[in-house]
Image (spheres, helix red, strand yellow):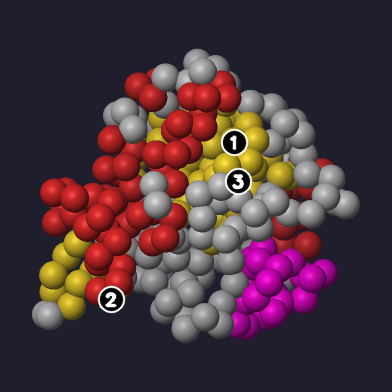
Amino acid sequence: MPFLEQDGLRYFVFERFPDSVIHAVFTRRGGVSPAPWASLNVGGTVGDDAERVRENQRRMLAAIGRSGDSVFDAWQVHGVNVFRADAPRPPQMPHPQADILITDRPQVTLLMRFADCVPIFLLDPRRGAIALIHAGWKGTVAGAARLAVQAMRQHYGSVPQDLLAAIGPSIGPDHYEVGPEVVEQVRATFGAQAERVLIARNGHTHFDLWQANRLLLEFAGVGQIEIAGLCTACDLENWYSHRAERGRTGRFGAVFAIK
């Protein structure tokens, strides 16, 4: 299993990505926050103390050799807005509302926060460009993964067939029961392919976010896709899960940068 440890922190990396990038999906281990955020919480809007959150973020970045002043992060709103990060976000700059961040600048570290939603990484190794995407069910049915591919094509000239994609730890289909309003929107997005991502079980319907985002990437022309297959709700020792912990939890960090 591709986990690494550094200074008491444990994080997941993908096997497909080359050494030309730095990437990690950090587990909840190794931070300073108490329960219910224990312990490496980097979410600033979940009730944890701001100083603890800053220390957790500092530790996380130090573990991968990146500085705090390299970060570009966003106010994630379960949408499909794209923000092109040409420089780190200055402290005085308000967080933009965006769930898709893209950059081709080595001085920028993209950072997003998760607790069941899907972290998606896109790398264009030819053009030295990356994207980091936050996709819950709303972002998935709105096509965030597909729109990220389009954004990389528009801004950097990326060819979808060149892209390497990775789908990180998130809530798995066994734990992700959804209601009829979600089912309706999934069917509208995926059409004849909807049955590949909607799973009927004991009179209930579950949504497979991993396969749904794989399909969206394939629809966009991406063929090289790695799926972590790690369920946040199954493993609360390593991950925060909004659903499994009934909203009283933290956020784990995903980071992506070009060397």
**Which three-letter amino acid code belongs to the residue tagged 3?**
Val
Residue 194, position in %: x, y? Answer: 18, 54
Q: Nearer the viewer, residue 177 or 5?
A: 177
Q: Nearer the viewer, residue 152 or 43?
A: 152
- The residue where tag 2 is placed is 179
Q: Which mark is residue 255?
A: 3
Q: Main secondary structure of the magenta part?
A: loop
- Does label 2 or label 3 sit earlier along the sequence? 2
- Does label 1 or label 2 sit earlier along the sequence? 1
The reply, left or right, for residue 215 in relation to residue 251 is left
Q: Residue at x 23, y 50 (%)?
A: 190
Neighbourhood count class around disc 3 (C-alpha, 10 Å): few under 14, some 14–19, many 20 upward: many
**Which three-letter amino acid code belongs to the residue tagged 1?**
Ile
- How far is the residue under mark 2 from the one under mark 3? 32 Å
Vertical placement of residue 41 versus 108, above or below: below
Marks 2/3 in contact by CB < 8 Å: the verdict is no
Indicate the secondary structure of the residue bearing disc 2: loop
Q: Quadrant of residue 252?
A: bottom right
Indicate the secondary structure of the residue bearing disc 3: strand
- The residue where tag 1 is placed is 102
**Which three-letter amino acid code belongs to the residue tagged 2?**
Gly
